Image: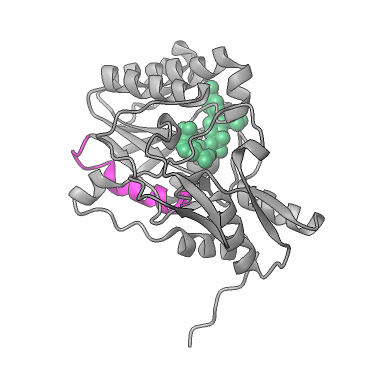
Amino acid sequence: MKVLVTGANGQLGTDLCKAIRDFELIPLTDKDIEISDMSSVKQAFSKHKPDIIINTAAFVRVDDCEDEKDKAFSVNALGARNVAVVAQELGARLVHLSTDYVFGGEHEPTSEFVGEGLVPSRNPRPYTEFDTPVPLSIYGKSKLAGENLVRHFCLRHFIVRTSGLFGVAGSMGKGGNFIETMLSLAEERDELRVVNDQVFSPTYTRDLAGKIVQLMTTDYYGIFHITNRGVCSWYGFTKEILKLTGIKTPVIPITSDQYPQKACRPRYSVLDNSHLRLLGMDDMRPWQEALKDYLIARGHIKQERDR
Ligand SMILES: NC(=O)c1ccc[n+]([C@@H]2O[C@H](COP(=O)([O-])OP(=O)(O)OC[C@H]3O[C@@H](n4cnc5c(N)ncnc54)[C@H](OP(=O)(O)O)[C@@H]3O)[C@@H](O)[C@H]2O)c1
């Protein structure tokens, strides 16, 4: 069986290529294919005739999407359409990556800062695959349009929504990842001020890649939420990063209003892996364990010796 991966040198693409061991792998980077160009997609796919296509390629810089709307829709919506149309023509299955930012945070708890972190005063409800997306940003809107086009044009599809990715390769589009940014800022600054009112589930690309490989040969088509278990804010995530690496720089919780960004982000975008759970396939581990493995893999901390 041949598996073709777009965005193969990206953060998730890199781990997918490592996880695809039992199949013939066709890794395509942006040098091999331009997904927003139908003829490029036709040429690349028909040359290799894959059985499964995993489309990770996307315009992922959330704030830049606000300024570059045409590019956002061209890549994230029409690019997804092109991939779906050609996948269907070739009779291939399609795994298409999407995002928690298709949701708008209306499940958000009213919250207050208490001591160390965010304490919801009501029970928030994570988004299931059966909830209706309401994106707030151009990035979210363009990714949702891409999902809809994939559903329309490719019958055997898996739409995989995930959130807060971190991977050893770092995001190509973003030039690194949040963890590496926080670790270098913690060395430079006396304190870190980090947003505490955007709540999500950080997800290790190695864990996500493993689950996608498990899923892609099944017939369980449809939408899947796949994240590591547990939730935190960016502030909580930073606290854990510094705790695990033994860095003492103080971290101050702030609100999104105190850290204005071009794109509006959901205050609460926790995804419930309900489809996986209903299939008995949700064994995603807690994000703290995944983070620890990431820090070991990047050489930031040492592996604990076996006792
Ligand atoms: N990062 C996150 O926190 C996050 C969260 C939720 C969902 N996602 C989704 O997960 C997927 C993977 O994200 P990631 O973090 O692995 O991103 P990434 O590291 O930026 O990888 C994306 C790859 O796609 C390539 N690419 C971009 N535009 C392309 C185009 N028009 N044609 C062909 N290739 C193109 C990029 O190459 P160049 O950079 O060289 O152009 C890059 O190698 C994306 O679909 C994203 O929307 C990401």
Q: Residue at x 72, y 68 (%)?
A: 248
The part of the chain drawn in magenta is 203-221
Left or right: 274 as drawn, with respect to 186 = left
Q: How is the image coloured?
A: one colour
The residue at the point 40 percent across, 48 percent down is 208
Q: Is residue 220 magenta?
A: yes
Q: Position of residue 237 (x, y in %)?
A: 56, 55
Q: Position of residue 101 (x, y in %)?
A: 45, 33
Looking at the rendered image, the quarter that the N terminus falls into is top left
- Residue 6 visible somewhere in the drawing: no
Residue 113 vs residue 162, the one in the foreground? 113
Q: Residue at x 55, y 26 (%)?
A: 59
Q: Image height check: is 209 above or below 154?
A: below
Q: Quadrant of residue 280?
A: bottom left
Q: Is residue 199 visible in the rendered structure shown here?
A: yes
Q: Position of residue 108 (x, y in %)?
A: 42, 40
Kindly indicate the quadrant of the structure image that contains residue 230: bottom left
Q: Is residue 199 left or right of residue 278?
A: right
Residue 3: name its quadrant: top left
